[in-house]
Amino acid sequence: MKWNRPGARLVIRLLGLGTALLCSAPQGMEARFTYTGEANLAQESAADGGSHLVKFSNRLDGEFAAEAGAGWKWFARAAVSSETRDLIEPGEPDDSAVRSKLSRRLFFNDYSEFELRELFVDGYLNDVFVRAGKQQVVWGQADGFRVLDVVNPMNLREFILEDSEDRRIPTWMLNLEVPVGQWMAQFLWIPDTTYDQVPSLQDKARFAPTSPLFVPYPAAPGPVRVSPADKPRQFFGDSDAGARINGFIGGWDLSLNYFYHYLDRPAPYQTPSGEVFVIAPAYERSHLLGGTLSTVYGDLTLRGELAAHSERYFITRNATTDNQGILSSAAVESVLGLDYNGFSDTFISAQVFVSRILDHDPGMTVSATQSTTSLLVERVYLNQTVTLGGQWFQSLNDSDGLLRLSVDYRWRSHIIFSAGLDAFYSDDLGLFGQFDGRDGISFGVSIDL
Amino acid sequence: MKPVYLLFLALLPIAASAADDAGHDIMQKVNARPDGEQVRRDFTISTTDRRGVTRVEKTIAYRKYFGADKRTVMFYTEPTNVRGTGFLTFDYSAPTADDDQWLYLPALRKIRRISSSNRGDSFLGTDLSYEEIKKENKVEISDYRFTLLEETTCLERPGLLVEAIPVSDRIAEELGYSKVHYCIDPAIWMARHVEFWDIAGNHLKTISIDEVQEIDGVWTSVDLQVVNHKTQHRTRLQQDNIDYSVEIDDQVFTQPYLRRGLR
């Protein structure tokens, strides 16, 4: 497989840019760069011929930190990336559909892009920690899926295969942390109206969802038109806001969370318009009240997380003019995790995710109760220079799942080689089964420059 | 049996008991060695595998006493691929109380609560265990029975050789050792040379403290080396920028600070 020219040119440019920035960093400013290269061998979908494809991707991450005076600091992180096959987000994705102006990426062409991943200033006002700017805030303790990890929207261009760090879309917000006795209170104000980026089937994106759990289908075959989502745009009126208080009491880590926000995925309202099936997505507000807990018993760590939503919106098969194909209900999501450290150099973590629609209607395409389990096993060898990992997700509703295997080798302090396998199974149109046939093998290298 | 032998046999337990008491007293003195109410320092951790490949990591660490309890937090600064990784420990003085430990993983941006039952495991790829990192050249007295073996030399200085045997099989399993020999420098009550044997009785590893400095009135190990005789893997732990007089805010030893990391 030839390395295409745009990809090769970009790598050379990235390395040149990194070197130039390193040399030009002003005194007192810290600059760090990491290059990541990856080759993917993947199976194309049957619709695309069922053959195999090879994709090379390159990425340069840069981190910059500087003193802002009076103990405050600036921090910025940006990434330039390219890939040799335009399959994940074909063409130049329309970021304006889901992202605010200041959170959009810059596309050089169909193959390469620049994204400002973080830019903030932070410091202390007496005891209050203040961080203002584009950032990520992570709530909750679950690995793999979000239950309370709802503050930042996600880019689901590769479903959940990308690292969570890369999946989260950083947003502009004000983040305050205030000590209250033994507790820490956090307050968030997020005027950034950026939401989940879900790849589109119309764009032939490799991980576009097709499951009726997420995509409405007309009762009879016919033309479908998807209107642009009615995206909130007001700076103040459409802001999200959240608060959390957490502490360590009697051996328990506890937190209580509240979030008033727009749900990150629009409700896909449907309107039969003549012979055309029109989908007109709209973003809806919801309140979230939740909490986390964790504690240790000998070799075991118990983790729990709960999120209660005042409103969630679900596709119904019984579409009427009144409900426009969408029914709403309060819903509860939870995860219970158990980590085991009893074997030397081995980490085992099992999780059960359960979500429940409190006012379920038989017409909904989603079951009243959805359950997914995950099992993670990691073992390190040779003084932690080699890490073998396996992660298995299994839907208990649709009997579909995802198996992930990985190996990392820390060859030198600054150089890590990695390889991985991702395999979806079951052809059910469930959460994982919808991507059956999207299996892949990857080989990568990460170099701290 | 002649009466003189009977007398010798009768005195043997008394002599052994005296050696036990002496060993115990020496280790009490080691543990009583002042180590500062608080300290801030930089660590350079170099690990070398049997092929001679050396990997280097750097950290910033803070430690502070809260009454008799001790809290420690450590942040990795280099290389970039581990930068921001943080490790927070609450070490309780009560022998029956399990420590609390948290690990912050920047790749996940999440804090992982970890069990302290793994105290004999390798600390983040080094040849030191979690227990040894936490204790900082001191020992959990209740884990061992100590016996003074002989007066000797430790790294060419007069020393006292103390043998430590785990008090139970369970403790031996937890720590990963069947026997430890501490060579104590009585001038500063610090173990300068320590030999470890694994559960099967095989010679496992050697710790030697090659450089000690008195900083702000506190004797401090600034250059420590470990050799694992089974794997031929080596670890060198160097300290610098050591400051025992610095004021450290209590908030440094909290999860929000662990998450904020080096900021």
Image (cartoon, helix red, strand yellow):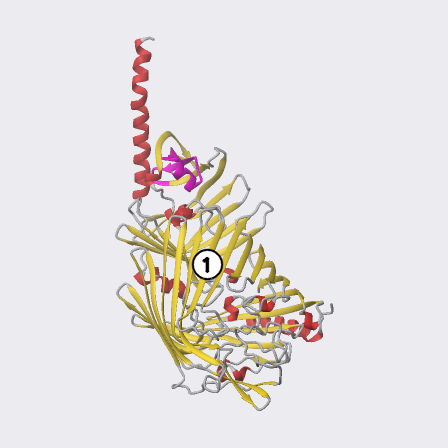
B81 is within the stretch colored magenta? no
Stretch in magenta: B161-190
Residue of label 1: A351
Q: Is residue B5 above or below residue A182?
A: above
- Spot occupied by residue A377 in the image (x, y as percentages of width and height): 51, 53
Quadrant where the image shows the C terminus of chain A: bottom right
Q: Residue placed farthest to the top in the image?
A: B2
Can you tell which quarter of the image residue A257 is in? bottom left
Q: Is residue B228 above or below residue A228?
A: above
Can you tell which quarter of the image residue B10 is in? top left
Q: Is residue A413 above or below residue A112?
A: above
- Spot occupied by residue B54 in the image (x, y as percentages of width and height): 56, 51
- Spot occupied by residue B67 in the image (x, y as percentages of width and height): 25, 52
Q: Is residue A282 above or below residue B95?
A: below
Which residue is found at the position 66% from the left and 65% from the top? Answer: A42
Please report, as a chain letter, where disc 1 is located.
A
Q: Classify mark 1: helix, strand or loop.
A: strand
Which residue is found at the position 45% from the left and 65% from the top? Answer: B109
Give A24 or B15, whichever is nearer the viewer: B15
- Spot occupied by residue A165 in the image (x, y as percentages of width and height): 50, 68
Q: Residue placed farthest to the right in the image?
A: A2
Q: Residues within 10 Å of mark 1 (few under 14, many from 20)?
A: many
Can the viewer see residue A70 in this picture? no
B115 sits left or right of A161 in the view: left
B77 sits left or right of B246 in the view: right
Give A27 or B46, whichever is nearer the viewer: B46
Give A75 or A334, whichever is nearer the viewer: A334
Q: Residue placed farthest to the bottom in the image?
A: A274
Q: Amino acid at mark 1?
A: Gln
B174 is within the stretch colored magenta? yes
